[in-house]
Image: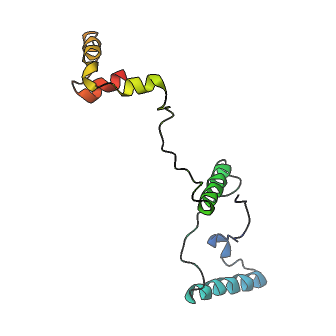
Amino acid sequence: MAEFEEKFLVINWKYLQDTGDALKDLHIGRLKRAIQQLEMDKLLPDNKYYICNEDEPYAKKVIDTILNGENNKANPVEAEVKPDNGGLDFTDKEIKHILGRPCFQFIGWSQAIRNLGYPLARKAEEEQSLGI
């Protein structure tokens, strides 16, 4: 199982500006030149990373998603693709019954709804969605 590990150092470029302090600026300049040299020598990967501050309210969801993705990469056979079914249980007897009805079976319901004054388009999919 994938575990969280701190393996990257992330520095916002805005913090690598001159500070007015000669010693700090010397170190910042060296760091910037070292990064630029690594880029020129093609020693840094081309891929990009998404960063999430750990104090963000969604941070736990982000790290859980990443760890689940890492687990799925490590165990592709165990990775189960679950389609988004909107929370419906398609094995439920009543849902199967409703979804299995042909659209023409909803005409009577639709006419009754229209007679009550509700606007309902005269299209099979609109009538069927009323029943569903």
Question: What residue appears at the point 58 percent right and 63 percent down from the top-left corner?
Answer: 50
Quadrant in which the N terminus is drawn = bottom right
Tell me residue 54's x, y (percent): 70, 56
Closest to the observer, 82 or 50? 82
Residue 20 falls in which quadrant of the image? bottom right
The correct choice, above or below, for 109 with respect to 50 in the image is above
| Identity of the residue furthest to the right in this view | 23
Tell me residue 30's x, y (percent): 70, 87
Tell me residue 120's x, y (percent): 27, 21
Closest to the observer, 5 or 50? 5
Residue 48 falls in which quadrant of the image? bottom right
Tell me residue 4's x, y (percent): 72, 60
Colour pattern: rainbow
Closest to the observer, 30 or 63? 63
Question: What residue appears at the point 46 percent right and 32 percent down from the top-left corner?
Answer: 90
Quadrant in which the C terminus is drawn = top left
